[in-house]
Structure formats: C-alpha cells, structure tokens
Image: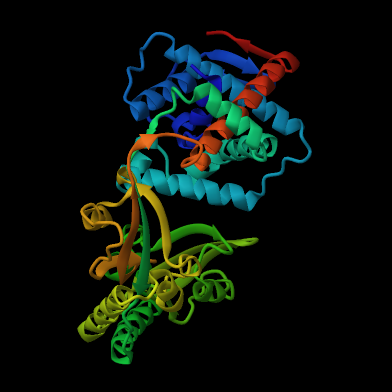
Amino acid sequence: MNKSFWISSLVSLIVLTSAVRAQPKVIDRVVAVVGREYILQSDLDDQTNYYAFANRIDPTAPGLKEQILEAMINKKLILERAMEDSTISVREEDVTAQLDQLIAQRVQQAGSEKKLEEVYGMPLAKMKREFRDETRKELMVQQMQQNKFGDITATKREIEDFYAMYKDSLPSVPEEMEIYHIFRLPKVTESAKKLSMGKAQRILDSIKAGGDFAQFAHRYSEDPGTKEYGGDLGFARRGQFFREFEEAIFSLKENQFANIVETPVGLHIMQLLERRGESVHVRHILFKIQLDSSQVELTKVFLVGLRDSVHNGAQFTDLAKRYSEDKETTPLGGYLGKFTVTQFDKVLLQVVKDMKEGAISDPIEVEYSASKGYHIVYLKRRIPEHKMNLQDDWKRVEQLATGTKRNNEYQKWIDQLHKDLYWESRL
C-alpha cells in the first residue's frame, strides 16, 4: 500500500485520539524511537483501532498494525526535520484555535461537554493543557509538508504523459450537470426587525442583571451549532466573522458585552470572554428576524418574472449579474459549477434530476449564510457519463497527475529522512 496514503490519512487524525485513553493502561511499552520522540504501544493501538473504525476494516487484519506504525514513524521523522527547520514557526494563537476546534468537534461527537469529560476522564480545561503540545506538533508537521510539497504541480507535458500511461485504468466520470442560479433574499420589514430587537434587548438586560448567559443561549439562541454549548464560539481569528460582528467584538474588553449587533443572519447578543493577540474567545445568542409572508411572496414573484424574461430572449447570466444577491456567483453570471449526481444535496438534486437542458426551475427555498432565501436554478447542460479524457476532463487528469507527482516526491523525501535521521522500530 502507498506509504504516502498512510501518512496523509494519519496526519488528519484528531490529536485527542492518540493523546489520551479513557481507561489508563498500567503496562505500556515503546514500540519505536524517532530522534527525540517515541511511540508507545498504546498510541499504536489507538491509531490502529481508530483508523479501522473510520474505514470499516478489521483492526486485526494482517500487516495493518505494521503499516500504521510505519506511517507514525514517518510522521515523527517529518516532525524531527521540522524542529530543525528555522522557517517552521507555529503561532500560539493558531495552536489555541486548532485545539479549540478539535475539542469542539469531539464535544459534538460525544453529545455534550460532560460526556466528553467522562470519556477522557478529565475536565475540558485539563484536556486543553494536556493536548496543547501534541497539537503544536501536528501543526508543525502540516506546515512542513505544505512548505515541501504545496507548490508542486504537474506540467502540461507531465499531465499528457500521465494520461497516456494510465488512461485505460482511469475511472469513468459520472453524469454531470452544469448549473447556474439567481438568488434573492426577501426584504426584512422594519416592524419585524423592531420585534426581534425588543426581544434581544430584554434578554441582554436580563443577562446584565445577573442572568445566566449559557441558559439564555440554550433556550433562545437560533444558532443550532452553538446553542447547546451556551452560545460558545470558541477561539477565532480576524476574518472568520461577519464584518459587523468582528468590528463589535474586537472593540470590547474581556467579559464585556456589546450592544446588539445586526449581521446578515440576524441580531446578536455577544460577549468577549478572552483575547489572545488576534484571536478572541466569544459567545453569542442569535435572533433571526422573522420574514413577512408578503415579502416572501414578492421575492418569488420577482424570480418568476426573471425566468419569464429568459423565455422571452434575455440571457440568464446577464440577469444573474444584475439581480442575484449571491456575492460569490454574481460576477460569474450565477455559475454554481459542474456537479455529479453524488455531489448534489438532496433538495437540489430533487429539483434538477428530471430537468432538461435549458430549463429553469420554480423558485426554491434555500439556506444562505444561515438565512432563508429563494433562487431559481438554470440547467445549462447535461454531460453524459464517459471515460475520463483530456478534452473534457483536463482538470481532473491534472489533479490526479499532480497528486501522483507529489506522492512520488514525498516518498523520495521520506526515504532520505530514513537515511539521515535516527529511528528504530521495536514492534
């Protein structure tokens, strides 16, 4: 099995998998030494079991544990080289942000913070201390790999040579559909905004008077991703929030509340819990502004009018550039992309699967940045299932050729690290 496949798979494993076990083992042993690092039997067992579970294979399969250990050794070799490289620098705020993200993922998997603490046998605060060094190492390995291979791409000649060599074994490309859309958000009325603002202000006043922020968030917040965690957004850096949200939160002192802030998704009560450089730890309560049914109907009627204009000779792409409110696709004439059947979400697939080329859908409700809007979808063309070829699938072949080139360069580098650095397997 390709060694680079194993290292790329294992590098992506969550740090918490190998850093701690729910039931401490009394007996453990070192199964490998790599420079200043070592690998324990318990770590190898955890990685093997996790990989087998994630890939639905038997963890006792012959050779699996040996291949996992080889990948772990390779990762340690990369870490050793990263420690020697003065260009590798991991910021503490990046470690914090990555660790918060990993723990938040595990909280979601476990069902609650309490259940996660039960699984790992320690409070969240201790987890963050225990796993911090391992998280830093993970980021160093990722940065080292990015620096080494991130800029490697296949040339035109290499792509053509790759295709000539592997064309008979390349997979078929499933049927694809090229689609465009025009998106509109129903307008928010002042009366609806005033109603939501009053509710938000009353709750903010209650919190300032001594109310429990987490309990209010759990009860009232309309952000499903954070309400179960008391509105906690964890640590985040600049550029990860809406502009209005960011301007307010970075102007606060620790534990201070902002005035109610409006963003494209609604109204926010927010509190700055902690600040570390350009990273902030925030919690919030979201109130979505309820749409007026008359505005929803007006939006649908407007979209139907645009569809009728296309039927009367207007260009869909011109109308999308002029009227669509999807900032990402508007400059592209509403172009969403080419998708295979497996890449569509269920709602959109249900709409386009029976459409003919050139057809435009009825207005469809769609989520957009946590808000509800409506769009009409234009199916420009269907591309039948076919064998991958350079004329129709250049980008696909290019990606495969680039991946193969990176894997080959990676393997050469790993072989050299095996020669240059000290390592020993004791399995």
Q: Whole-percent x and y of residue 114?
A: 33, 47
Q: Residue 217, how many percent across, how many down? A: 33, 67
Task: Reply above or below: 264 against 163.
Answer: below
Q: Hey, which residue is sitting farthest right in the picture? A: 86
Asked which quadrant contains residue 261, the reply is bottom left
Q: Nearer the viewer, residue 207 or 163?
A: 163
Quadrant in the picture for residue 151: top right
144 in relation to 43, above or below: below
- What residue is shown at x 29% (from left), y 91% (from top)? 191
Q: Nearer the viewer, residue 218 or 84?
A: 84
Q: Position of residue 404 (x, y in %)?
A: 57, 28
Residue at the bottom extreme, as displayed: 191
Q: Nearer the viewer, residue 86 or 231?
A: 86
Is residue 417 positioned above or below 144 on the image?
above
- Residue at 37% across / 76% down in the picture? 314
* Position in image of residue 266 (x %, y %): 37, 76
- Residue 90 is left or right of residue 385, and the answer is right
Of residue 194 and residue 2, the one placed in the foreground of this image is: 2
Say which residue appears at 36% left-offset and 62% top-offset. Answer: 230
In the figure, residue 212 lies in which quadrant? Answer: bottom left
Q: Residue shown at 58%/14% (left/top)? A: 32
